[in-house]
């Protein structure tokens, strides 16, 4: 009988630990390559020559030509930094998108790898932590 209170206390302790959303309380550590200067340069490209903003919106909130990049819900992959780099290099042909609209590869200016990595750093920075959940666009 004397063991029962102890077991009871252990159970309570483990339930409390399990309930703590540890990941949500800590900022996500930056992957290598996501530096302040890469983010700043990527931000300029996003709104400038690479013209991501034309389709994804000035605030990356999405337009009729490209989905929101808000980070809570990714349509085409895991949202990691290296995945963003590859996604921007490859673009997405129209037959592989939900909306049947294409995404050009390397923005609108055929950016070199270094610029692609900077834009990816900027997109990573505005999506970690994620901002809001947007609904999935429907194929038209
Ligand atoms: C001509 C319009 C257009 C431009 C310019 C464009 N995109 Fe896209 N992007 C799209 C479309 C369309 C999709 C796919 C949406 C779908 O599946 O319907 C997409 C998808 C993406 C995705 C994947 C989103 C997800 O939820 O998985 C990322 C990341 C992305 N674009 C980033 C960029 C970046 C960064 C740039 C600038 C270098 C850029 N895009 C330029 C139209 C564009």
Image: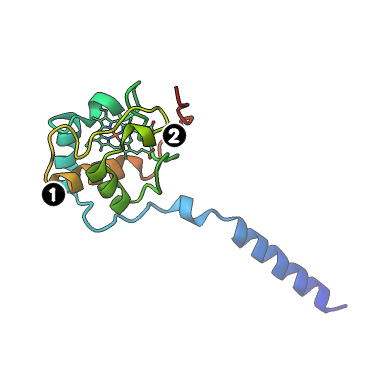
Is residue 109 shown left or right of residue 81? Answer: left
Give the vertical position of 64 relative to 14 (above or below). above
State the SS at label 1.
helix
User: Looking at the rendering, in which quadrant would you find the N terminus?
Assistant: bottom right
Note whether 105 is above or below 85 in the view shown: above
Q: CA distance from mark 2 to mark 1?
A: 29 Å
* Residue at point 35%, 51% (across, down): 80
Q: Is residue 42 visible?
A: yes
Disc 2 beta carbon < 8 A from ligand 1? no
N-term-proximal mark, 2 vs 1: 1
How many dots with numbers?
Answer: 2
Numbered label attached to residue 132: 2
Check the image and report above or below for 6 versus 126: below
- Disc 2, disc 1: CB below 8 Å? no
Residue 50 located left or right of residue 78: left
Give the percent coordinates (x, y) of residue 69. Answer: 35, 35
Point out residue 132 in the picture as x, y percentages from the top left corner: 44, 34
Secondary structure at numbered mark 2: loop
What residue do we see at 37% from left, 31% from top? Answer: 68
Q: In this figure, which residue is indicated by the disc labeled 1?
A: 114
User: Which residue lies at the image location 37% right of the left edge and 47% below the top edge?
Assistant: 79
Q: Which quadrant: the C terminus?
A: top left
């Amino acid at each position: 009988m004397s063991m029962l209170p102890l077991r009871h206390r252990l159970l309570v302790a483990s339930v409390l630990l399990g309930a703590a959303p540890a990941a949500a309380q800590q900022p996500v550590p930056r992957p290598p390559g996501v530096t302040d200067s890469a983010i700043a340069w990527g931000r300029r490209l996003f709104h400038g020559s690479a013209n991501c903003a034309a389709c994804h919106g000035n605030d990356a909130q999405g337009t009729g030509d490209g989905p929101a990049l808000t980070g809570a819900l990714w349509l085409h992959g895991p949202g990691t930094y290296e995945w963003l780099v590859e996604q921007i290099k490859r673009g997405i042909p129209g037959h592989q998108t939900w909306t049947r609209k294409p995404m050009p590869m390397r923005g609108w200016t055929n950016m070199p790898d270094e610029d692609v990595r900077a834009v990816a750093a900027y997109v990573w920075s505005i999506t970690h932590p994620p901002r809001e959940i947007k609904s999935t666009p429907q194929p038209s």
